[in-house]
Amino acid sequence: MDLAQALVRLIGYLGVFALVGATGLGARLCSDLGAASERMRDRALHVAIFAALVLIATALITLLNQTSMFFGDDEGVNAETIRTIAMETGWGAGWRVQFGAATFALMGALLIRSRRMFGWPVLGVGAIAAAAAQSLTGHAFEGSWLSVKVLAQAIHVVAGSLWIGSLLVIVVAVMRHESDDDTIATVVDRFSPIAVISVAALAASGALSSYFNLASPVDLISTAYGRVLLAKILAFGATGALGFTNWRKIRPHLGTKPGTARLRRVAAVELAFALAVLVLTTYLVVLPLPAWGI
Protein backbone atom coordinates (compact mmCIF):
# COMPACT_ATOMS: atom_id res chain seq x y z
CA MET A 1 0.00 0.00 0.00
CA ASP A 2 1.52 3.31 -1.08
CA LEU A 3 1.23 6.62 0.72
CA ALA A 4 -1.78 7.77 -1.31
CA GLN A 5 -3.73 4.59 -0.56
CA ALA A 6 -2.82 4.82 3.13
CA LEU A 7 -4.06 8.41 3.22
CA VAL A 8 -7.36 7.40 1.59
CA ARG A 9 -7.81 4.63 4.15
CA LEU A 10 -7.03 6.99 7.04
CA ILE A 11 -9.49 9.59 5.72
CA GLY A 12 -12.09 6.84 5.46
CA TYR A 13 -11.57 5.90 9.11
CA LEU A 14 -11.91 9.54 10.12
CA GLY A 15 -15.12 9.73 8.09
CA VAL A 16 -16.57 6.70 9.88
CA PHE A 17 -15.68 8.10 13.30
CA ALA A 18 -17.08 11.55 12.51
CA LEU A 19 -20.29 10.09 11.05
CA VAL A 20 -21.01 7.90 14.07
CA GLY A 21 -19.97 10.64 16.50
CA ALA A 22 -22.20 13.24 14.88
CA THR A 23 -25.13 10.83 14.86
CA GLY A 24 -24.63 9.90 18.50
CA LEU A 25 -24.32 13.51 19.60
CA GLY A 26 -27.42 14.54 17.67
CA ALA A 27 -29.41 11.70 19.21
CA ARG A 28 -28.33 12.64 22.76
CA LEU A 29 -29.15 16.34 22.44
CA CYS A 30 -32.63 16.90 23.86
CA SER A 31 -34.71 20.04 23.55
CA ASP A 32 -34.22 20.84 27.26
CA LEU A 33 -31.16 22.89 26.31
CA GLY A 34 -33.36 25.27 24.36
CA ALA A 35 -31.88 27.10 21.41
CA ALA A 36 -28.46 25.60 22.14
CA SER A 37 -29.82 22.14 21.30
CA GLU A 38 -30.88 23.30 17.86
CA ARG A 39 -27.57 25.00 17.20
CA MET A 40 -25.52 21.97 18.23
CA ARG A 41 -27.74 19.53 16.39
CA ASP A 42 -27.45 21.62 13.26
CA ARG A 43 -23.65 21.61 13.50
CA ALA A 44 -23.62 17.87 14.18
CA LEU A 45 -25.81 17.35 11.13
CA HIS A 46 -23.38 19.30 8.95
CA VAL A 47 -20.56 17.09 10.23
CA ALA A 48 -22.62 13.97 9.45
CA ILE A 49 -23.33 15.10 5.88
CA PHE A 50 -19.68 15.94 5.26
CA ALA A 51 -18.53 12.64 6.81
CA ALA A 52 -20.98 10.60 4.71
CA LEU A 53 -19.78 12.32 1.53
CA VAL A 54 -16.17 11.62 2.55
CA LEU A 55 -17.02 7.94 3.10
CA ILE A 56 -18.71 7.66 -0.30
CA ALA A 57 -15.73 9.31 -2.00
CA THR A 58 -13.12 7.15 -0.24
CA ALA A 59 -15.16 4.02 -0.98
CA LEU A 60 -15.14 4.82 -4.69
CA ILE A 61 -11.40 5.54 -4.68
CA THR A 62 -10.76 2.30 -2.78
CA LEU A 63 -12.76 0.35 -5.36
CA LEU A 64 -10.64 1.82 -8.14
CA ASN A 65 -7.44 1.00 -6.23
CA GLN A 66 -8.58 -2.57 -5.56
CA THR A 67 -9.43 -3.04 -9.24
CA SER A 68 -6.04 -1.69 -10.29
CA MET A 69 -4.18 -3.98 -7.87
CA PHE A 70 -6.16 -7.05 -8.94
CA PHE A 71 -6.01 -6.62 -12.72
CA GLY A 72 -2.75 -4.69 -12.99
CA ASP A 73 -1.68 -3.26 -16.34
CA ASP A 74 -2.93 -6.19 -18.41
CA GLU A 75 -6.64 -5.43 -18.29
CA GLY A 76 -6.49 -2.14 -16.40
CA VAL A 77 -9.33 -0.23 -14.78
CA ASN A 78 -12.49 -0.06 -16.86
CA ALA A 79 -16.21 -0.55 -16.42
CA GLU A 80 -16.00 -4.33 -16.73
CA THR A 81 -13.09 -4.86 -14.33
CA ILE A 82 -14.67 -2.51 -11.79
CA ARG A 83 -17.94 -4.43 -12.07
CA THR A 84 -16.10 -7.72 -11.59
CA ILE A 85 -14.43 -6.58 -8.36
CA ALA A 86 -17.56 -4.93 -6.96
CA MET A 87 -20.07 -7.63 -7.90
CA GLU A 88 -18.22 -10.94 -8.15
CA THR A 89 -15.78 -11.03 -5.23
CA GLY A 90 -16.10 -11.46 -1.48
CA TRP A 91 -14.27 -8.17 -0.99
CA GLY A 92 -16.76 -6.50 -3.31
CA ALA A 93 -19.70 -7.78 -1.29
CA GLY A 94 -18.28 -6.11 1.81
CA TRP A 95 -17.54 -2.98 -0.18
CA ARG A 96 -21.14 -2.80 -1.37
CA VAL A 97 -22.36 -2.87 2.23
CA GLN A 98 -19.94 -0.07 3.17
CA PHE A 99 -20.94 2.06 0.19
CA GLY A 100 -24.66 1.39 0.68
CA ALA A 101 -24.50 2.19 4.38
CA ALA A 102 -22.73 5.51 3.76
CA THR A 103 -25.30 6.41 1.10
CA PHE A 104 -28.14 5.43 3.44
CA ALA A 105 -26.66 7.63 6.18
CA LEU A 106 -26.40 10.55 3.76
CA MET A 107 -30.07 10.09 2.83
CA GLY A 108 -31.01 10.18 6.51
CA ALA A 109 -29.01 13.35 7.12
CA LEU A 110 -30.60 15.06 4.13
CA LEU A 111 -34.05 14.04 5.36
CA ILE A 112 -33.30 15.65 8.73
CA ARG A 113 -32.12 18.77 6.97
CA SER A 114 -35.51 18.83 5.19
CA ARG A 115 -37.14 18.82 8.66
CA ARG A 116 -38.25 15.19 8.45
CA MET A 117 -37.42 13.86 11.90
CA PHE A 118 -37.73 10.21 10.85
CA GLY A 119 -34.39 10.86 9.17
CA TRP A 120 -32.61 10.36 12.53
CA PRO A 121 -33.28 6.58 12.65
CA VAL A 122 -32.21 6.34 8.99
CA LEU A 123 -29.01 8.23 9.76
CA GLY A 124 -28.39 6.10 12.85
CA VAL A 125 -28.79 2.79 11.02
CA GLY A 126 -26.59 3.98 8.17
CA ALA A 127 -23.85 5.26 10.48
CA ILE A 128 -23.64 2.12 12.61
CA ALA A 129 -23.79 -0.10 9.53
CA ALA A 130 -21.01 1.91 7.86
CA ALA A 131 -18.81 1.43 10.93
CA ALA A 132 -19.59 -2.26 11.39
CA ALA A 133 -19.08 -2.98 7.69
CA GLN A 134 -15.41 -1.99 7.91
CA SER A 135 -14.83 -5.52 9.20
CA LEU A 136 -16.03 -7.02 5.90
CA THR A 137 -13.00 -5.99 3.84
CA GLY A 138 -10.15 -6.49 6.32
CA HIS A 139 -8.26 -9.21 8.19
CA ALA A 140 -11.37 -10.37 10.05
CA PHE A 141 -13.21 -11.42 6.88
CA GLU A 142 -12.58 -15.04 5.90
CA GLY A 143 -15.59 -15.75 3.71
CA SER A 144 -18.31 -15.57 6.37
CA TRP A 145 -19.99 -12.45 7.71
CA LEU A 146 -21.19 -14.34 10.79
CA SER A 147 -17.81 -15.36 12.21
CA VAL A 148 -16.69 -14.34 15.69
CA LYS A 149 -13.73 -12.50 14.15
CA VAL A 150 -15.99 -10.33 12.01
CA LEU A 151 -18.31 -9.65 14.95
CA ALA A 152 -15.39 -8.70 17.22
CA GLN A 153 -13.95 -6.37 14.61
CA ALA A 154 -17.36 -4.80 13.93
CA ILE A 155 -17.85 -4.11 17.65
CA HIS A 156 -14.30 -2.72 17.79
CA VAL A 157 -14.93 -0.15 15.06
CA VAL A 158 -18.40 0.83 16.31
CA ALA A 159 -17.17 1.26 19.89
CA GLY A 160 -14.16 3.30 18.79
CA SER A 161 -16.39 5.47 16.62
CA LEU A 162 -18.85 6.11 19.45
CA TRP A 163 -16.07 7.08 21.85
CA ILE A 164 -13.58 9.06 19.78
CA GLY A 165 -16.06 10.13 17.11
CA SER A 166 -18.39 11.64 19.72
CA LEU A 167 -15.48 13.40 21.42
CA LEU A 168 -14.35 14.80 18.07
CA VAL A 169 -17.80 16.17 17.30
CA ILE A 170 -18.17 17.59 20.82
CA VAL A 171 -14.90 19.50 20.34
CA VAL A 172 -15.80 20.68 16.83
CA ALA A 173 -19.54 21.29 17.17
CA VAL A 174 -19.89 22.22 20.85
CA MET A 175 -16.76 23.47 22.59
CA ARG A 176 -15.54 25.57 19.66
CA HIS A 177 -18.83 27.46 19.41
CA GLU A 178 -20.68 27.37 22.73
CA SER A 179 -19.59 29.77 25.44
CA ASP A 180 -22.00 28.70 28.17
CA ASP A 181 -20.13 26.44 30.61
CA ASP A 182 -23.31 24.78 31.89
CA THR A 183 -24.32 23.78 28.35
CA ILE A 184 -20.92 22.21 27.73
CA ALA A 185 -21.12 20.41 31.08
CA THR A 186 -24.55 18.98 30.21
CA VAL A 187 -23.36 17.69 26.84
CA VAL A 188 -20.28 16.06 28.40
CA ASP A 189 -22.43 14.45 31.11
CA ARG A 190 -24.62 12.87 28.43
CA PHE A 191 -21.58 11.69 26.50
CA SER A 192 -19.80 10.13 29.50
CA PRO A 193 -21.91 6.92 29.79
CA ILE A 194 -21.42 6.28 26.07
CA ALA A 195 -17.66 6.76 26.47
CA VAL A 196 -17.39 4.38 29.44
CA ILE A 197 -19.36 1.60 27.70
CA SER A 198 -17.51 2.15 24.42
CA VAL A 199 -14.06 1.92 26.03
CA ALA A 200 -15.00 -1.36 27.71
CA ALA A 201 -16.35 -2.80 24.45
CA LEU A 202 -13.31 -1.52 22.56
CA ALA A 203 -10.86 -3.18 24.96
CA ALA A 204 -12.75 -6.48 25.04
CA SER A 205 -13.19 -6.72 21.26
CA GLY A 206 -9.58 -5.67 20.69
CA ALA A 207 -8.33 -8.38 23.02
CA LEU A 208 -10.48 -10.97 21.22
CA SER A 209 -9.23 -9.85 17.80
CA SER A 210 -5.63 -10.05 19.04
CA TYR A 211 -6.27 -13.59 20.24
CA PHE A 212 -7.33 -14.59 16.74
CA ASN A 213 -4.64 -12.62 14.91
CA LEU A 214 -1.58 -13.57 16.96
CA ALA A 215 -0.16 -17.08 16.95
CA SER A 216 1.41 -16.47 20.40
CA PRO A 217 2.14 -13.51 22.74
CA VAL A 218 5.75 -13.57 21.51
CA ASP A 219 4.46 -12.27 18.17
CA LEU A 220 3.96 -8.87 19.81
CA ILE A 221 7.73 -8.49 19.73
CA SER A 222 8.94 -10.86 17.03
CA THR A 223 6.71 -9.78 14.10
CA ALA A 224 6.05 -6.50 12.32
CA TYR A 225 2.31 -6.93 12.88
CA GLY A 226 2.83 -7.52 16.59
CA ARG A 227 5.09 -4.50 17.07
CA VAL A 228 2.64 -2.18 15.34
CA LEU A 229 -0.19 -3.71 17.38
CA LEU A 230 1.80 -3.13 20.57
CA ALA A 231 2.32 0.52 19.61
CA LYS A 232 -1.42 0.79 18.97
CA ILE A 233 -2.19 -0.72 22.39
CA LEU A 234 0.12 1.80 24.07
CA ALA A 235 -1.47 4.71 22.18
CA PHE A 236 -4.92 3.38 23.08
CA GLY A 237 -3.84 3.18 26.73
CA ALA A 238 -2.71 6.80 26.65
CA THR A 239 -5.99 7.85 25.04
CA GLY A 240 -7.96 5.91 27.65
CA ALA A 241 -5.94 7.41 30.49
CA LEU A 242 -6.76 10.90 29.26
CA GLY A 243 -10.41 9.92 28.92
CA PHE A 244 -10.36 8.65 32.49
CA THR A 245 -8.87 11.98 33.58
CA ASN A 246 -11.71 13.79 31.85
CA TRP A 247 -14.28 11.53 33.51
CA ARG A 248 -13.00 11.44 37.08
CA LYS A 249 -10.92 14.58 37.52
CA ILE A 250 -12.32 17.23 35.18
CA ARG A 251 -16.02 16.41 34.76
CA PRO A 252 -16.89 17.22 38.42
CA HIS A 253 -15.56 20.76 37.84
CA LEU A 254 -17.42 21.41 34.61
CA GLY A 255 -19.84 24.32 34.62
CA THR A 256 -16.98 26.64 35.56
CA LYS A 257 -14.54 28.55 33.35
CA PRO A 258 -11.42 26.75 34.67
CA GLY A 259 -13.08 23.34 34.28
CA THR A 260 -14.09 24.06 30.68
CA ALA A 261 -10.64 25.39 29.81
CA ARG A 262 -8.94 22.30 31.22
CA LEU A 263 -11.36 20.03 29.37
CA ARG A 264 -10.50 21.73 26.08
CA ARG A 265 -6.78 21.16 26.63
CA VAL A 266 -7.07 17.52 27.68
CA ALA A 267 -9.62 16.70 24.94
CA ALA A 268 -7.25 18.08 22.30
CA VAL A 269 -4.41 15.85 23.54
CA GLU A 270 -6.79 12.87 23.76
CA LEU A 271 -7.78 13.38 20.12
CA ALA A 272 -4.11 13.60 19.12
CA PHE A 273 -3.43 10.19 20.68
CA ALA A 274 -6.60 8.84 19.05
CA LEU A 275 -5.29 10.02 15.68
CA ALA A 276 -2.07 8.12 16.37
CA VAL A 277 -4.18 4.99 17.01
CA LEU A 278 -5.92 5.45 13.64
CA VAL A 279 -2.61 5.97 11.82
CA LEU A 280 -1.27 2.75 13.35
CA THR A 281 -4.51 0.94 12.45
CA THR A 282 -4.16 2.10 8.85
CA TYR A 283 -0.75 0.43 8.72
CA LEU A 284 -1.83 -2.59 10.74
CA VAL A 285 -4.61 -3.71 8.41
CA VAL A 286 -2.22 -4.26 5.48
CA LEU A 287 0.40 -6.25 7.39
CA PRO A 288 0.30 -10.07 7.19
CA LEU A 289 -1.06 -11.77 10.28
CA PRO A 290 1.30 -13.92 12.39
CA ALA A 291 -1.59 -16.36 12.80
CA TRP A 292 -1.39 -16.96 9.06
CA GLY A 293 2.13 -18.26 9.49
CA ILE A 294 3.58 -15.53 7.25
Image (spheres, grey):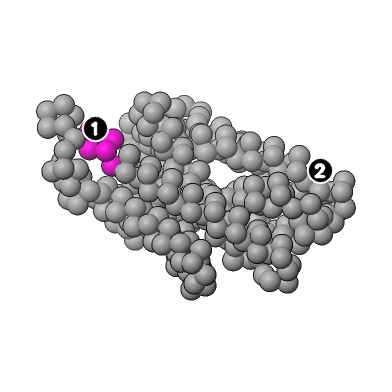
In the rendered view, would you say 37 is above or below 93?
below
Pinpoint residue 289: horizontal percent, then vertical percent. 38, 36
Q: Is residue 37 left or right of residue 64?
A: right
Mark 2 surroundings: few (<14), some (14-19) or many (≥20) residues within 10 A? some
Ranked by sequence position, the earlier of labels 1 and 2 is 1
Q: Which amino acid does label 1 sit on?
A: Met
3 within the magenta span: no
Could you say which quadrant of the image residue 131 lies in? bottom left
- Numbered circle sitting on residue 262: 2
Q: Which of 174 and 114 is in front in this view?
A: 114
Q: In this view, does 126 lie to the left or right of 22?
A: left
CA neighbours of label 1 inside 10 A, class few (<14), some (14 to 19), many (20+)? few
- Looking at the figure, which quarter contains the C terminus? top left
Read off the magenta span: 63-69
Badge 1 element: helix
Numbered badge on residue 92: none
Q: Nearer the viewer, residue 90 or 150?
A: 90
* Main SS of residues in magenta: helix
| Residue at 16% over, 46% down | 84
